[in-house]
Every structure is written in structure tokens, then in C-alpha cells.
Image (cartoon, helix red, strand yellow):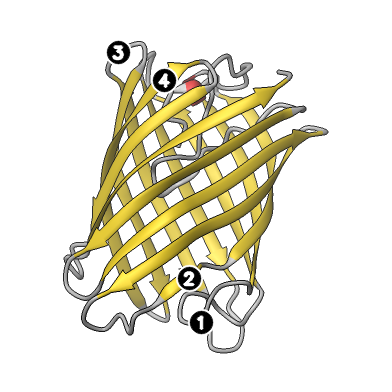
Amino acid sequence: MALGLAAAVPGGAQETIASDRPGIGSASVVVAPGVLQAEFGTAWAGGPGPDALAIGQLLVRYGIAGVELEFLGNSWVNSRGEGANGADGFEDAAVGVKVPVARGIGDRADLSLQGLLTVPTGSEGLGSDEWIPTVVALADVALGEAAALGVNLGFSKGSGAVEDQVTASVTPSVGLTASLSAYAGWAGSFVDGTQSDWLEAGLAYLSGPDLQLDLNGAISPDTDRWFVGVGMAVRTGSR
């Protein structure tokens, strides 16, 4: 979600960068026309099963004609350990668009829709052979001058060996100082009657109006798998 709490001012111009990093969910904020924003990072995952290093987490966002065009390059992954089969390579890429639906609902909430199409470009064992469409509803709600709540609800249409999937996340955030904010929340996925949960938390630091740094992590109570990561978001262009 927008950890700089830019989403706590519904409908307003984004004076500081509003990133989809580092939480599992995404913000409703649509970057302004002419703005180019890049978000990237790295994460280390462990727990029962193989360890994995993911480098990249690339998301490129560009605003045009009131909507946001997106390219998700995702990550290069190196996985080692029991059950990993020495897997390493690239995850599937995706393209998408984010469209604002409503701004300033009740003077405190914003709503957007995001459409994504996963492209089967990943390495063997790290990607799918299918083109997978996804639609996500994204909401941000101001809870006061220094707090906000992000909510996502998504659906991916499976094909071939890929099952339909419902995803959801609820992510409160709070401003600790003018530059530092924190979040903690839940994210889950539901596939063929099976639920997978993650509990997450992290920090975001606004180094300047166009640069955000972050530290993030999560744990799955279902599997005891965990990950920790760092990253950044930068923007340029007119706004």
C-alpha cells in the first residue's frame, strides 16, 4: 500500500511518492500523467523446504490519460535445499493497467481497479505455461491524519493446470514520523478450497519526495515459511 500515507488524502495530488511496495497488497493510487515510477527489491525466503533468494521484484508504472500502465518484470530466483531441485531462473512477467474508479468517497476513501495479464516467460519450474488474467479491486481508507487502511480483493482465472485463485489483503499503516511509516497486515489466497495465509509487517522511509526505501517481512502460519526483504521506489517526470 501507499506507505508514505499519501492515500490518507483521498483525491489529492501526490506530493510525495506513493509506492505499491513493500506490502503484499497494492495501493489504489494511480501515478499522474507523465510520471514514470520504478519499484524493485530483493528478498530471502526460508523455513521448511528450500531457501530462496529473489532479486528484482521489478514493477514499472507510467501514468497516461488518467490511467496507469504497468510492467511487472518480477524476479530472478535462486532456490537451493531439500525439494528445490536446484531451481533458478526468472519468474513470469506480467503487464497491466490500473484505473481510478472513485476518489474521495466520504472524504476518506479511494477505489481503483487493476487488470493484469501474466505472460508465460518464466524459467522451467518458476513460471506457468499459461496466460493468466487477474482483476483486483484496490481500496485505501484514511483513518485519521497519520493512519490508513489498504484493502485488496482479486481473482485470477486459471487455465490448463493452473487453478482459479482468489486473493485478499488487509493492511493498516501508520506514520511514525514525517518520513517513516510502518505497516502490519494479513494476506491470503484461496485455491480449490485450500487457504494460504501470510502475516506481514515492515517499514518505509521517504528519503525525498521521489524516493522511498523499505524493509519488509512476512511469515506463513500454515507452513512456517518466511521471507525478509529490502527495496526502493523512485519516480521521475511531470506531476
- Alpha carbons under labels 3 and 1: distance apart: 45 Å
Circle 1 sits on which residue? 124
Residue type at mark 2?
Gly
User: Residues under labels 4 and 2: Cα distance?
Assistant: 32 Å
Looking at the image, is mark 4 or mark 1 nearer the viewer?
A: 1
Depth check: give the residue in front, 87 or 219: 87
Residue at the extreme bottom of the image, as rendered: 160
Tell us which disc is closer to us: 4 or 2. 2
Residue 116 appears in the picture as rendered: no
Residue at x 62%, y 43% (from the top left corner): 60
Q: Which residue is mark 3?
A: 177
Q: Residues within 10 Å of mark 2 (few under 14, many from 20)?
A: some
Determine contact: label 3, label 1, CB under 8 Å: no
Measure the alpha-carbon separation of dots 4 and 1: 38 Å
**Real-space CA distance between mark 1 and mark 2, rounded to the nearest whole angstrom:** 8 Å
Q: Which residue is mark 4?
A: 206
